[in-house]
């Protein structure tokens, strides 16, 4: 496998083939139905745990697979080529919660929580965004105050939380990675800290399941409420004020895997329009013989290949638990997410009326693609970061 950027080892190829087979047999048959119902397929999701995929980047001692960023990208690409909503639920669990804990948690926390989330027995999520704060993390208003017993009392609400609820009864996620203000440091700056909140903790509940989303309808999105929610001191991750470090160490992998979802969407959209252009005739010719259609297919192919190479090159350079690849993790997400949306749009254009209805997959892919330009960092935040990083390191352009 040496020299194969997309499958650099036999193990990577095995993971790709395993996920591809699972998608064909189990994910694809249910994708349209669960999108229409706006429901999360929890039993199917738990099967990912049985396959050893929910802890793909977690050390084996905690029940994980001990794999790298490339393996994570492969899984997200393959799932998203069929059902991006289901893939998003996987990302929220395996990247935003599980990998975050594996990198930043204490030995005790990892031993307590990781086996259950790696097996699929427990479902996790990460709660950062609020109704009035997203990219501006220092604008978060959820707060935690230490009580006389040394525990933390959390008050506030979180919005747009993927996996925040796991069923139609409003059952909250089993374990939540929560960011909250914990006062100010000696220089008057806000301190953000990280807490693990378990289902059953008094004061932790689902406020509402978010309905009528444009896309990603097969993943549940919810508001989470923390009302005098008492969290034991041992459930704080790291030190008080350490949350920004946790964010930075996990954010690059999150953006990489969101870009991998975009590659999956682009691949499936290109496949659909190419097949249709071969089969459909107009004015006595296959429509692929018309210049307008050739432009749609040709530009889509070039963009798809460019984003895929960029994705897997970035993955190959990424070391889990370390920052240092922000320029390219931002860059690949900036490029791939918009390209995926444009390729899905071209697929609809090529397929005409058939592309516009839900029975054909490109309509769903087009809707799902839009979220990737918003979640995990907006396009505007990537543009800002890239410009800032290039100002600090202009030689990066030459490397």
Image (cartoon, grey):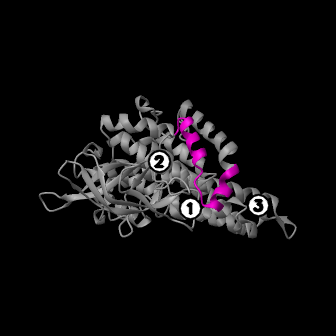
Whether the magenta-drawn stretch holds residue 341 is answered as no
For the residues labelled 1 and 3, say whether their Cβ atoms are less than 8 Å apart: no
Task: Where is residue 292? Give x, y as percent.
Answer: 71, 69
Q: Secondary structure at mark 2?
A: helix
Quarter-of-image position of residue 282: bottom right
Specify which label sits upstream in the sequence, 2 or 1: 2
For the residues labelled 2 and 1, say whether their Cβ atoms are less than 8 Å apart: no
Q: In the rendering, which numbered label is found on residue 93?
A: 2
Task: Where is residue 84? Give x, y as percent.
Answer: 58, 55
101 sits to left or right of 24: left
Does residue 344 lie above or below 76 as drawn?
A: below
Question: Which residues are drawn in magenta?
Answer: 29-53
Task: Where is residue 28? Give x, y as percent.
Answer: 68, 49
Residue that label 3 marks: 277
**Circle 2 or circle 1, nearest the eye:** 2
**Nearer to the camera, 118 or 247:** 118
Whether the magenta-drawn stretch holds residue 52 is answered as yes
Residue that label 1 marks: 369
């Amino acid at each position: 496998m040496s020299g194969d950027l997309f499958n650099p080892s036999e193990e990577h190829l095995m993971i790709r083939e395993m996920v591809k087979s699972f998608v064909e047999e189990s994910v694809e048959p249910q994708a349209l139905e669960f999108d229409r119902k706006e429901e999360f397929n929890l039993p199917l999701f738990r099967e990912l745990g049985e396959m050893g995929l929910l802890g793909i980047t977690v050390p084996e001692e905690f029940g994980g697979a001990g794999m790298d960023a490339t393996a994570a990208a492969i899984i997200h690409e393959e799932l998203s080529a069929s059902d991006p909503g289901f893939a998003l639920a996987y990302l929220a669990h395996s990247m935003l919660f599980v990998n975050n804990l594996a990198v930043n948690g204490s030995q005790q926390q990892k031993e307590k929580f990781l086996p259950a989330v790696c097996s699929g027995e427990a479902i996790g999520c990460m709660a950062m965004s609020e109704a009035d704060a997203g990219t501006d993390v220092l604008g978060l208003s959820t707060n935690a105050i230490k009580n006389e017993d040394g525990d933390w009392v959390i008050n506030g609400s979180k919005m747009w939380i993927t996996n925040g609820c796991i069923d139609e009864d409003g059952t909250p996620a089993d374990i939540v990675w929560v960011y909250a203000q914990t006062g100010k440091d000696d220089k008057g700056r806000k301190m953000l800290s990280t807490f693990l909140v378990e289902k059953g903790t008094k004061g932790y509940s689902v406020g509402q399941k978010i309905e009528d989303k444009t896309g990603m309808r097969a993943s549940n999105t919810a508001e989470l409420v923390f009302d005098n929610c008492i969290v034991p001191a041992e459930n704080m991750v790291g030190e008080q004020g350490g949350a920004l470090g946790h964010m930075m160490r996990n954010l690059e992998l999150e953006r990489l895997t969101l870009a991998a979802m975009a590659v999956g969407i682009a691949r499936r959209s290109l496949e659909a329009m190419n097949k249709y252009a071969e089969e459909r005739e107009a004015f006595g010719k296959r429509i692929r013989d018309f210049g307008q259609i050739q432009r749609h297919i040709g530009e889509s192919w070039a963009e798809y290949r460019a984003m895929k190479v960029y994705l897997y090159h970035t993955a190959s350079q990424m070391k889990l638990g370390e920052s240092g690849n922000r320029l390219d993790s931002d860059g690949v997400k900036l490029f791939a997410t918009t390209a995926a949306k444009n390729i899905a749009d071209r697929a609809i254009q090529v397929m005409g009326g058939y592309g516009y209805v839900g029975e054909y997959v490109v309509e769903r892919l087009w809707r799902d693609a839009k979220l990737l330009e918003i979640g995990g960092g907006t396009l505007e935040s990537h543009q800002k970061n890239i410009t800032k990083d290039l100002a600090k390191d202009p030689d990066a352009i030459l490397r």
